[in-house]
Image (tube, rainbow, N blue to C red):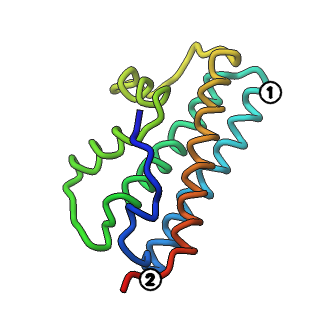
Amino acid sequence: MPRVETVERRVSGTIPPRWLSQIDAQLTDAERRLAAAERHLAAGSGARAIEEAYPGVMAVAIVKVWLRDEPWHTQRSHQDLGRLMRDELPSGFAMLFEMKGDRRSFAGWRPEDARPLIEEARAFTAGTRTEVEACRRQPPAP
């Protein structure tokens, strides 16, 4: 399970506007994907719901990494970013990440099995959106 910290302690200063725009785009895409995942659940397709939500959760995980690692100040290798993203994933999606490997499909998931993962994804996304909003209100570092 990822560490729980307040963003105020993690972000050392103002996030540059272009990064905020990218963060907003990532979160908006994840929220759109989660709405589509909910529609797939309602239609009885757990596999399609997870297929829709999975890339959104990965996008939110990179936002979590950006908030902690401040890429506007640091540079990381692709491998480091991948590891950091995996570490930020909520538990159900960390399990999916490990299970997925090279497979491209989440075939066989029933809606009742997928629903807890979609709920976890929604909470993960909403919590990250709250962290980002707290950063917007944070005064610039001296």
The C terminus lies in quadrant:
bottom left
| Residue farthest along the bottom direction in this orientation | 142
Q: Answer with left or right where residue 127 lies relative to residue 103.
A: right
Name the residue tied to disc 1: 42
x, y (%) of residue 13? 39, 76
Q: Residue at x 23, y 52 (%)?
A: 78
x, y (%) of residue 2? 40, 38
**Label 2 is placed on what type of residue?**
Pro
Please name which of the two marks, 1 or 2, marks the residue nearer to the observer: 2
Front residue of 25/88: it is 88
Front residue of 36/83: it is 83
The residue tagged with tag 1: helix, strand or loop?
helix
Which of the labelled discs sits on residue 19, or is there none? none
Q: Residue at x 47, y 34 (%)?
A: 90
Tag 1: Cα neighbours inside 10 Å, few (<14), some, or many (≥20)?
few
**Label 1 is placed on what type of residue?**
Ala
The residue tagged with tag 2: helix, strand or loop?
loop
Name the residue tied to disc 2: 140
Q: Residue at x 44, y 44 (%)?
A: 4
x, y (%) of residue 136? 55, 73
x, y (%) of residue 115? 67, 24
